[in-house]
Each structure stands twice: as C-alpha cells, then as structure tokens.
Image (cartoon, rainbow, N blue to C red):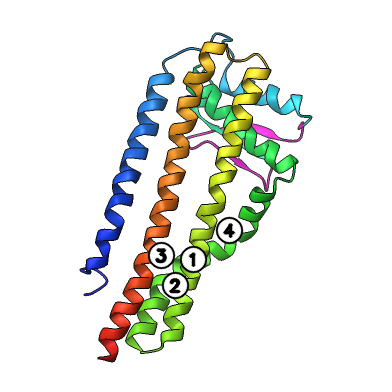
C-alpha cells in the first residue's frame, strides 16, 4: 500500500507540526483575549454593524451563527455571520474577529482583486482537490503518465487557492485594525492585544498554505517514484 506507507510522508511532518501549533495558538489567543473587556464596551455585532454603516454598506446583514470560531462573511448573500462567542461579547477578541469579517465585506465592496480571484477559483479548486489523488493513483497503476500529471495539476489548483487566501486574510486583518482604531473602538493599548488575536488566526492560513505546498511536492515525488517502480 504505497500511498499509505510511503517515505514521502515525512515531508508533511513539519507542516503538520506547524498546523497543530497554529491551531493551539489561535485557541489560546482567543481564549485569553475573550476574557479582556474592551474599554468601549461595544459588542461584536454592534461594532460590525457600525463599521458596515460607516462604509455605506447598508445591504450587508449581520447574523448570529452557532459554532466556535465559525465567523465568516458570505459574499453571495452579503451576510456577515458571527459566532455566539463574538456576536454578543464586548471582549477584545470579539471586536477583532468581528472587524476582520467586516474587512472581508469591505474587500467585496471595493472589488478587491485577490478576493475576486479566490471566489472565482473556488469551484475548480474544490474539484481539483477531490480528483487529484484518484487521478494520480489511476494514472500510475494504468501506466498512463498523462493521467497522473493531470491529477497533480488538479491539486495545484487547491494550492493556488491557499496562496491567494493569504493576502486576502492579511488584508482583512489590516483593514480591521485600522477601522477599529480610527473609529475609536480600541484604545491605543488595546490595538496590540487585538492584533495578537488576528495574527494568531492568520498563522492558521500560513500553516494551511505550507501544508498544501508540501502535499503538492509529495504528490510530485509519489508520481515519479511509483511511476518508475510500476514501469520496472
């Protein structure tokens, strides 16, 4: 079973460690600063609504959604969804997360290039991610190198999606901090603390990108190693 027990898996170990660290970091940062109340006393839902209005985005809805750290902005319905821990909380963590999602709404309104590109490739990236391994395996065992190559290229679309996600997320966080500070929702001493929450969240995207790139390298190696073994 070469795809289960193969030496190339070692390539993923550093990325797995980083992913685990990033997940622990975002959890610990959110937990820490969710206990620190903001000086403004405004909730995540309130700050989201006010920031949207300040940009003239009256058509964007703010809704509560269940789930921990399930916050997101849906550009298809222009809906900003905040989790229970953010929606009604006035903590620094809640304000940071809510403003970050508002940052995505700002990007959507401004036709931010990377966001448009990411949205455009979502369907093909999902298809590529699902078909990559089956195509690679089929190509190797049927001795059809072209099919294996198509599988690797299909997975590269998922890697491209992750790469594009990085500037989208970093830009949203930058917009969030600027909006919170300029709007007077954060004191000078609170900006740095809120930034730590957003930086921890950004690290999870960095880890996901590194994992995707390493997986692509691994698939390229598997394609070559197993292809040669099959021919021999």
Q: Do tag 3 and tag 2 residues touch (Cβ < 8 Å)?
A: yes
Distance from the alpha carbon under mark 1 to that under mark 2? 6 Å
Taking the image as shown, residue 7 lies to the left or right of residue 93, namely: left
What is the crowding at mark 4: few (fewer than 14 residues within 10 Å), some, or many (at least 20)? some
What is the crowding at mark 3: few (fewer than 14 residues within 10 Å), some, or many (at least 20)? many
- Residue at image location 20% in from the left, 68% down from the top: 5
Q: Secondary structure at mark 4?
A: helix
Taking the image as shown, residue 126 lies to the left or right of residue 212, namely: right
Q: Residue 61, how many percent across, how many down? A: 68, 34
Picture quadrant where residue 117 is located: bottom right
Q: Secondary structure at mark 1?
A: helix
Q: Which residue is mark 3?
A: 216
Question: In the image, which disc is placed on residue 156?
Answer: 1
Distance from the alpha carbon under mark 2 to that under mark 4? 17 Å
Mark found first going from the N terminus, 4 or 3: 4
Q: Secondary structure at mark 3?
A: helix
> Is 196 in the magenta?
no
Q: Which residue is mark 4?
A: 122
- Residue at image location 44% in from the left, 14% down from the top: 36
Mark found first going from the N terminus, 2 or 4: 4
In the picture, the quarter occupied by the C terminus is bottom left
The kind of secondary structure the magenta stretch mainly shows is: loop
Magenta-colored span: 57-77
In the picture, the quarter occupied by the N terminus is bottom left
């Amino acid at each position: 079973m070469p795809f289960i027990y193969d030496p190339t898996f070692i390539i993923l170990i550093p990325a797995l460690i980083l992913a685990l660290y990033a997940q622990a970091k975002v959890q610990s940062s959110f937990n820490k600063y969710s206990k620190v109340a903001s000086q403004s006393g405004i909730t995540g839902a309130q700050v989201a609504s006010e920031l949207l209005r300040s940009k003239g985005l009256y058509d964007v809805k703010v809704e509560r959604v269940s789930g921990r750290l399930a916050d997101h902005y849906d550009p298809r319905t222009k809906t900003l969804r905040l989790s229970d821990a953010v929606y009604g909380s006035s903590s620094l963590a809640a304000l940071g997360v809510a403003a970050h999602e508002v940052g995505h709404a700002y990007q959507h309104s401004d036709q931010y290039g990377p966001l448009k590109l990411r949205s455009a490739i979502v369907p093909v990236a999902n298809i590529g991610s699902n078909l990559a391994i089956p195509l690679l395996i089929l190509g190797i065992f049927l001795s059809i190198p072209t099919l294996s190559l198509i599988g690797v290229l299909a997975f590269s679309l998922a890697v491209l999606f992750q790469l594009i996600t990085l500037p989208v997320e970093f830009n949203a966080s930058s917009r969030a901090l600027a909006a919170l500070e300029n709007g007077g929702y954060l004191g000078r001493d609170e900006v740095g603390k809120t930034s730590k929450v957003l930086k921890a969240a950004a690290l999870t995207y960095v880890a996901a990108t590194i994992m995707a790139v390493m997986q692509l390298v691994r698939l390229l190696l598997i394609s070559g190693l197993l292809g040669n073994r099959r021919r021999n």
